Image (tube, rainbow, N blue to C red):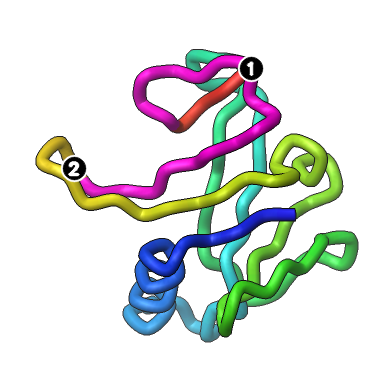
Amino acid sequence: MIALTDSALEAVRTAMARSQAAATPAGLRIQVETGGCAGYKYMMGLVAEPQPDDAIVTNGDVSVFIDPVSQPLLAGTTVDFVVALEGSGFTFTNPNASNSCSCGKSFG
């Protein structure tokens, strides 16, 4: 369904360890919403628990939660975390994207 690189896994683990949320995060929610400059945009965040209809993908010791609407749009996607002069952040390699914007945060 979706894979996280070692760099992305480490970034998520670090974020979970530093989380100031009242409840310890159970995992990372990745979803797709309409918007962005290419049609769809990626949304990510730590959550305390999955929703009942979420797909749960385990990457090592990190759980990723994906809602049913986003599942077909994210199938086969690889998430990476890169550190570059321009800034650090998550990147997506999505085989379902026919185009994407230069920021890498939206696709069509």
Badge 2, how many Cα within 10 Å: few under 14, some, many 20+?
few
Image position, residue 13 (x, y; %): 42, 77
Q: Contact, CB < 8 Å: mark 2 with mark 1?
A: no
Please determine whether, in this image, residue 72 is positioned above or below residue 10.
above
Q: Which residue is mark 2?
A: 87
Q: Residue furthest right?
A: 53
Where does the image place residue 36, in percent across and percent down from the top left? 51, 21
Figure check: 53 above or below 37: below
SS label for mark 1: loop
- Whether residue 100 is in magenta: the answer is yes
Find residue 76 and report its horizontal and vertical position in percent.
70, 46
The label shown at residue 98 is: 1
Amino acid marked by disc 2: Gly
Identify residue type, mark 1: Ser
Q: In the image, is 34 to the left or to the right of 4?
A: right
Q: Would residue 27 appear left or right of 88 to someone viewing this image?
A: right
- Residue 50 placement (x, y as % from top left): 74, 69
Q: Which residues are magenta?
A: 88-104
Residue visible at 36% across and 67% down in the picture: 11
Q: Main secondary structure of the magenta part?
A: loop
